Amino acid sequence: MSDVVSFAKEGSIGLITVNNPPVNALSQAVRAGIKESVEKGIADPDVKAMIILCEGRTFIAGADIREFGKPPMEPHLPDVVQSIEDSPKPIIAAIHGTALGGGLEIALGSHFRIAHSSAKVGLPEVKLGLLPGAGGTQRLPRVAGVEAALEMITSGDPVSAAKAKEMGIIDEITEGDLKKAAIAYAKRVIDEQLPLRRVSQLEAKLDTPTVFEDFAKRNARKFRGFLAPYKCIEAVKAATELSFPEGMKREREIFVELQASDQSKALRHVFFAEREVVRIPGLPEDQPTRDIKSVGIIGAGTMGGGIAMCFANAGIPVYLLDVSQEFLDKGMATIKKNYANTVSKGRLTQEEMDKRMSLIKPTLSYDDLKDVDLVIEAVFEDMNIKKEVFKKLDTVCKPGAILASNTSYLNINEIASVTKRPEDVMGMHFFSPANVMRLLENVRGEKTSPEVYATAMKIGRKIGKIPVLVGVCDGFVGNRMLAQRTRECAFMLEEGALPWQIDKVIYDFGFPMGPFAMADLAGLDVGWRNRKAKFDQLTEREKRCNILDKICEMGRFGQKTGAGYYKYDEKRNPTPDPLIEELIINHSKEVGIERREIGDQEIIERAIYSMINEGAKILEEGIAARPLDIDIVWIYGYGFPRYRGGPMFYADLVGLNKIYEAILKYREAVGPEYWTPSPLLEKLVKEGKGFYSK
Ligand code: 3HC
C-alpha cells in the first residue's frame, strides 16, 4: 500500500487507515490509497466489511487545498467516493475530529457512518469560494433533506456529531474508543446482514417548490457579493431535479467553474494567509515567549473596556484603571451592558457572564499593576499624556512586564524612549469595538525585543484575535493606507461626487459600508480632531478641502448627533441630506473647482489604487514584512471584501500594469505629491510580476 493509507485485516474486517498529517487531507496519494484499499478488500474473500478511519487528530479534513490550481491528478475524488459506494461489501466510515469537505463526502459515500461524540462534520468548501465537488451537493440533500443541506452547504459551518445524527448524517455515536466501536458496528452489519445503504439511491425530496428562491432571498445580505453560495444553491437544486449521475455532472461543471474563479483564488489565499500571518519571518518556530497570566488596562473608555473584555473572555484576569471613580463606574457599566446583551441573545450563560465580570477589577491605583505581566494603555491619543502614563508604568511595573500602547498612529519609539526598558515596549493596536473586531496590529518599535513581540503575537491568538506584526510609521499599516482613501474621497467630493455616490460604489465593491457612512459611524469629530492636530503638515489643497470642518462646525458629528454627511432617523437609518449636497456644491464654487461627472471606475481607482500604492511603499520600507500582512489587516480591520483577497492580492488580480497606468494618470490630474508610483510597484511592473509572484 502507500505511505499514507494502509490496509490491515482484523478477522473478517478490512481496516483502511489514512495517515497523512496534519489533517489527513485527500492528496493524490491518499485518494489512490483509499481506492486501492477498497479494491483489495473487495477482492479478498476473507473480508466481509471495511472501515475507513484515520490516525492523528482528525478524520479527513477535505481535499488537499494545495493541489488546487495545479493539473488534476487521477484518481479524481468523485470517482473514489463512487468506488466506495459501489462496493458490494459494506463500508463504514469511523469519524473523529472533523470530517470536512471531501472527508464528509467520503463518509457520505460509505454505507454507514459512526462518529465519536466529540466529532464534527461539515462542508466548508463555500468558504473557499467552492462547492462540495465530490457528491456533497447531491448526497447531503438526499440524506439530510433539502433545507438542512442548503443551510450546511452555504454556511460552510460544521455541526456536532449529535446534531449530525439528528439530521440523519450519522448512524451511531460512541463515547468510547472509536476503532473498537466501529469494529463492533461492522460485526453487527455482517451478522445481521444489514442491507447496504447507498445514499445516491435515496431521493432528495422537495417540501416547498419555492424553497430555493426563499432561501436565497432570506440570506441575500449574508451572501452579498459572494458567488459560491448561489452556485451551491444551484447544485442542490439539481439534486432535486436531475438523476444522480446527471446531478453529479452538474456539480462537477460548477465546481470546475468556481475553482477557476478569482473569488475562489482570493478566498484560498486568505485561508493560507491567515495561518501564515502569525509566523514571523526571521524568528524561529521555538522563539521563547513570556507567560501572560494577568493584565492591566489603562483607560476605562470604549477601547479600554473592549480590550478588558477580550482578556476576560479568555479567562485572564484584568485590572482596569482610570483616573476617576466616575469613569470607572461608567466603563464597568458599559462592559456589563455588553455582556448582558450577549446573554439576552442566548450566546452566553449568566454564569459565564458573572465569571467574566469577576475577572475585571476596576482600580484607581497604579500600585495594583505592580505584578501584572502585560499593560495595555488605552488613554486619549495625545503624546504627552501617553508619555506620562508610560513613565508611571516604568516605575510601578515589575521587570519583564510588557508595556503596550493601543495608539492608532503615534510613534511607539518616542513613547518607549521615556522608559528605561524600551525593549519591553510596543504597540498593540485594537480595532473598535475591541471585543468584536478580529484584527490586532502589533507594532514593533525599533528596540522592542523579539521575545516581547512574539509574546504579543501569541497572546493575540489566545484572546481570539488575528495578530499582524507591523513596524512604526504614522498610522501603521491600516490607518496609513486609509488616509489615502480618505483624502481621495474628500477630493472627489469637491471635484463633483457626492458622499452617497462614493459610498454606493465602495459598498458595491464589497465593503460593509462606504467611507462617509463609516465616518458618520465613527464620529466626525474624531477625524476633525486629527485634521486639526496635523493641519500644519497638510498640503495647500488638503487645507482648502475643508468640507469636513464645515460639517463639524454645524455640530454634525455623525450618527451620535443624528446628522453628519447623512441625516439619521431615530433608528439610525441614513438618508442623503440636500443641505450637505448644497454645502458641497457651494464649496466647489468657493474653491473655484468646476464640478464634473465622476464615474464609478474613477471612484474605485482613486479610493483603492491609492491604498495599493501606499501598501507597496509600506512593503518597501519594511513596515509590513509581506503583502499577506497587509491583506489580513485590511480584511479583518476594515472589512475589505474577503472574496477579493485583500488590497495586495486584488492588485495582482487587476494586474499591476493597469494600476501603474492609473497612478500615472492621476499624477497628471491630481498631483505628484499624492500620486507618485512606489518604486517597488514600478519595479514589479517592469519585471511583469505581481506582489505575490515569486
Ligand atoms: N488542504 C491542505 N492543507 C490543509 C487543509 C487542506 N484541506 N486543511 C488544513 N491544512 C493545513 C493548514 O494550512 C495548516 O498548515 P500549516 O501548519 O502549514 O499552516 C495545517 O493543515 C493545520 O491546519 P490548522 O492550522 O487550520 O489546524 P486546526 O487544527 O486549527 O484546524 C481544520 C484544522 C479544522 C481541519 C482546519 O485546518 C480547516 O478548516 N481546514 C480546511 C478544511 C476545508 O476547507 N476542507 C474542504 C477542502 S475543499 C474540498 O474538500 C473540495 C471537495 O469537496 C472536492
Image (cartoon, rainbow, N blue to C red):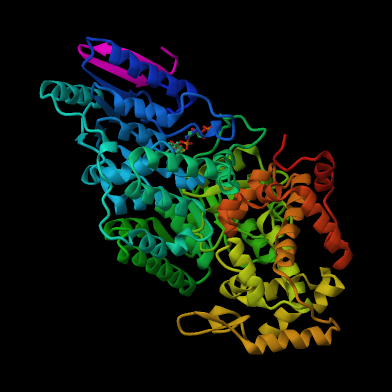
671 in the magenta segment: no
Q: Is residue 413 above or below residue 559?
A: above
Q: Nearer the viewer, residue 515 or 239?
A: 239
Give percent across and percent down for residue 443: 65, 49
Q: Nearer the viewer, residue 581 or 597?
A: 597
Give percent across and percent down for residue 261: 58, 46
Q: Is residue 258 above or below residue 605?
A: above
* Figure quadrant of residue 456: top right
**Residue at horizontal 64 percent and vertical 44 percent from the top:** 628
| 81 relative to 363 in the view: left or right | left
Secondary structure mostly seen in the magenta stretch: strand
Total number of numbered labels?
0
Give percent across and percent down for residue 213: 38, 62
Does residue 315 appear in this view?
no
* Figure quadrant of residue 19: top left
Q: Is residue 495 above or below residue 212?
A: below
Q: Which residues are magenta?
A: 1-18
Give percent across and percent down for residue 153: 39, 48
Does residue 119 appear in this view?
yes
Q: Is residue 192 above or below residue 366?
A: above
Q: Specify the quadrant that holds the C terminus.
A: top right
Q: Nearer the viewer, residue 384 or 175?
A: 175
| 435 relative to 343 in the view: left or right | right
Q: Residue furthest left?
A: 192
**Residue at horizontal 39 percent and vertical 20 percent from the top:** 35
5 in the magenta segment: yes
Q: Specify the quadrant that holds the N terminus.
A: top left
